[in-house]
């Protein structure tokens, strides 16, 4: 397994800053979305990925624009890291016509084929077979694209996850399964929901390369992702990455989190992947706090602008709901 | 012109669809080397290769979900579900993903997929091998549902379903696969996919059927004619959307309608048909719309399935009841 020190040294300054920018964009997007939701300005449910940013940033930094991802109900971060546009995402959270899907998909189903986001999915495990299909499509077409499925440890208990691990190995598909292991299936801890909490052992049993990585260490995530993506791209078949990380927020915004002590969340913030990467940027790349602070400000300004634009978009029109039920009728 | 069984017609139709479009793929359990348990995909892997006719593990959810990903990337997957009851493991994928992706994406993601399901009973199989799950899919907006009843329709409807950008649940009456032969004109211009058709004209009552019960109703009409009762038989062919115009036209003339399907009567297609006919043909109706179908039990063991399935006698009994009003 690649060590963190080795991983860091393979990252140049520009990429190091890109990783920071991606993680901070996710953090701010999620924070703002949480505030908007608490203020009653967003309809529906939202599930935030604060604390898990290093997984999205590290994995997607190993991908090309033409590669695909599928993600989950907690998928804002993956979409941002894969190049999703924050204004259309925010419009979607707001349920506005200018959102990615005319305000229909909401937070949990954001998709953008143009940048390879095959879709987030509200069904736990729902995106995994789609990513397998994307990988099969790439293999059949002879393209060197790679498909990545992000899912949580909760999805590992779903039958379809195992069908997909089998299919991908059987057909030697160019896919990377990324288990964002935050220790919870919704509100249930892993001790209660998985017989074997080390998911790499389950994946390895199917015959694929399976690696555990500290999901709060963006350099380590990037390193194992690069290996897995290269294996997929070069015909070596699927890989499995278990990235242990922390979900700072509840399962959903508004979750009172009675199932865990406050100290648990406090301990998580001590492992903040962004704070850790800030230290690395300073110590190993000589990036000043001022430089990072001004990057933070630019990110905040971009997201504030996205919110303003989303609020200015027309509301999704109920009269339009009969459109797009059937593709043929929409030709 | 070629004389074909329904099984051969579906095979020939699939073959032609694969020739017409290299993006058409066939996937499913035993569809490749074996050619399918009912021989519907016989010879296709040999001619089109393992990359276009893919033998899958027994993993219905994974297969349909994989087909979703293929459809997103420009392929037109045709998934064979080996038996009707095996579709339930894939139900989540079909209802939660296949049906909803185009709507959910604001029209950006088409879902050109066909899910072929041999359905219905009458072959001495048991539950999970003899079921009629059509209402569960017809109830789901975003899915199209069709049922063929004869070789000519089988040949054309499968090609039309594959060519459609809509996801289509394609129901094949398995007991008809090898039952009857018909002349198929490969150069004909077929009716559109989503139209119903009068297959026998009559003036006294209308029988509404699809899939395996079309033959039952045709036989009932022939028997009734010997007693001077002329029954109109409509092969619905399309179950979602329903094509009601020929139904309204017929019932407006006959004043009486009997729906016949193998599926359980309770909340089956017959309930929807009865409701719509009542709403639109109220002043023409001489009798309530009657329903003949499977009983509200799980599908029975093989030994008693003939008692369970709607047959000539039960259809004629319903006809007598509607005429007696």
Image (cartoon, grey):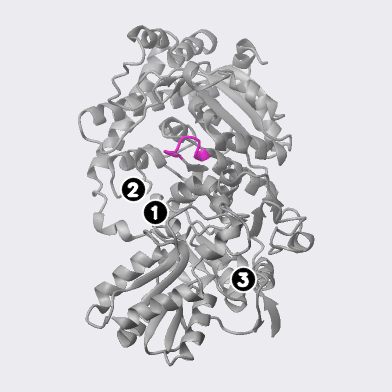
Q: Indicate the position of residue A79 as horizontal and vertical percent values.
A: 45, 36
In depth, the one of B11 and B180 nearer the eye is B180
Residue at 49% from the left image edge and 68% from the top image edge: B310
Taking the magenta stretch, the answer to whether it contains residue A278 is: no
Q: Report the Cα–Cα distance between label 1 and label 2.
A: 8 Å
Look at the image and give the residue range highlighted in magenta: A120-127
Identify whether B320 is placed above or below B91: below
In depth, the one of A273 and B58 nearer the eye is B58
Q: Chain of mark 1?
A: B
How many discs mark residues in the rendered view?
Answer: 3
User: Taking the image as drawn, is residue A62 in sight?
Assistant: no
Residue under numbered circle 1: B103
Identify whether A229 is placed above or below B201: above
Disc 3 crowd rating (10 Å Cα; few below 14, some 14-19, many 20+) is: many
Secondary structure of the residue carrying numbered label 1: helix
Q: Report the Cα–Cα distance between label 2 and label 3.
A: 42 Å
Earlier-in-chain disc, 3 versus 1: 1
Cβ atoms under marks 1 and 2 closer than 8 Å: yes
**Same chain, labels 3 and 1:** yes
Secondary structure of the residue carrying numbered label 2: loop
In depth, the one of A274 and A210 nearer the eye is A210
Residue under numbered circle 2: A104
Cβ atoms under marks 3 and 1 closer than 8 Å: no
Q: Indicate the position of residue B243 as horizontal and vertical percent values.
A: 40, 74
Identify whether B24 is placed above or below A226: below
Q: Indicate the position of residue B66 as horizontal and vertical percent values.
A: 59, 46
Residue A250 image-quadrant placement: top left
Residue under numbered circle 3: B176
Q: Report the Cα–Cα distance between label 3 and label 1.
A: 35 Å
Disc 1 crowd rating (10 Å Cα; few below 14, some 14-19, many 20+) is: many
Q: Indicate the position of residue A267 as horizontal and vertical percent values.
A: 41, 7
Q: Is residue B321 left or right of residue B91?
A: left
């Amino acid at each position: 397994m690649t060590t963190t020190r080795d991983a860091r040294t393979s990252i140049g300054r520009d990429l190091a800053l890109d990783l920071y920018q991606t993680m901070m964009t996710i953090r701010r997007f999620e924070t703002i979305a949480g505030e908007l939701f608490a203020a009653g300005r967003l309809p529906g449910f939202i599930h935030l990925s604060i604390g898990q940013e290093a997984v999205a940033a590290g994995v997607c930094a190993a991908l090309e624009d033409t590669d695909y991802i599928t993600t989950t109900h907690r998928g804002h971060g993956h979409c941002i890291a894969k190049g999703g546009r924050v204004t259309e995402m925010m419009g979607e959270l707001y349920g506005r016509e200018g959102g990615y899907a005319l305000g229909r998909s909401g937070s949990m189903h954001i998709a953008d084929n143009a940048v390879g986001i095959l879709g987030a999915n509200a069904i736990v495990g729902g995106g995994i077979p789609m990513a397998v299909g994307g990988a099969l499509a790439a293999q059949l077409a002879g393209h060197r694209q790679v498909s990545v499925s992000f899912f949580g440890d909760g999805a590992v208990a779903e039958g379809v996850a195992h069908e997909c691990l089998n299919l991908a190995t059987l057909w030697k598909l160019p896919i990377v399964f990324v288990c964002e292991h935050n220790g919870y299936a919704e509100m249930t801890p892993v001790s209660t929901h998985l017989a074997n909490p080390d998911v790499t052992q389950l994946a390895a049993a199917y015959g694929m390369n399976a690696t555990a990585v500290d999901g709060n260490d963006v350099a380590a995530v990037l390193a194992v992702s690069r290996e897995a993506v290269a294996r997929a791209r070069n015909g070596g078949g699927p890989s499995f990455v278990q990235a242990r990380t922390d979900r700072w927020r509840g399962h959903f915004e508004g979750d009172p989190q009675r199932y865990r002590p406050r100290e648990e969340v406090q301990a998580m913030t001590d492992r903040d992947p962004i704070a850790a990467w800030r230290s690395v940027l300073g110590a190993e790349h000589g990036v000043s706090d001022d430089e990072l602070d001004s990057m933070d400000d630019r990110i905040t300004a971009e997201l504030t602008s996205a919110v303003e634009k989303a609020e200015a978009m027309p509301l999704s029109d109920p009269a339009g709901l009969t459109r797009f039920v059937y593709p043929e009728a929409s030709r | 012109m070629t004389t074909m069984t329904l099984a051969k017609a579906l095979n020939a139709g699939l073959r032609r669809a694969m020739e017409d479009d290299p993006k058409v793929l066939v996937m499913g359990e035993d569809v490749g080397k074996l050619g399918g348990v009912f021989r519907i995909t016989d010879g296709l892997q040999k001619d089109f290769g393992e990359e276009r006719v893919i033998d899958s593990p027994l993993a219905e959810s994974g297969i349909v979900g994989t087909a979703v990903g293929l459809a997103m990337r420009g392929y037109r997957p045709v998934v064979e579900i080996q038996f009707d009851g095996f579709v339930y493991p894939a139900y989540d994928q079909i209802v939660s993903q296949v049906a909803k992706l185009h709507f959910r994406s604001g029209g950006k993601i088409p879902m050109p997929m066909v899910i072929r399901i041999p359905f219905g009973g009458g072959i001495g199989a048991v539950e999970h091998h003899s079921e009629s799950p059509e209402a569960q899919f017809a109830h789901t907006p975003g899915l199209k549902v069709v049922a063929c009843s004869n070789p000519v329709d089988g040949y054309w409807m499968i090609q039309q379903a594959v060519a459609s950008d809509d996801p289509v649940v394609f129901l094949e009456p398995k007991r008809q696969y090898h039952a009857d032969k018909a002349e198929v004109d490969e150069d004909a211009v077929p009716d559109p996919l989503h139209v119903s058709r009068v297959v026998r004209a009559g003036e006294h009552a209308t029988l509404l059927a699809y899939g395996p019960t079309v033959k039952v109703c045709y036989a009932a009409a022939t028997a009734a004619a010997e007693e001077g009762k002329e029954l109109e038989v409509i092969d619905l062919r399309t179950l979602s959307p329903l094509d009601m115009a020929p139904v309204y036209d017929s019932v407006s003339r006959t004043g009486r309608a009997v729906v016949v399907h193998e599926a359980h009567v309770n909340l089956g297609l017959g309930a929807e048909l009865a409701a719509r006919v009542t709403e639109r043909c109220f002043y023409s109706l001489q009798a309530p719309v009657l329903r003949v179908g499977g009983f509200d039990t799980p599908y029975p063991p093989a030994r008693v399935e003939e008692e369970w399935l709607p047959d000539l006698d039960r259809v004629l009994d319903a006809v007598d009841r509607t005429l007696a009003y």
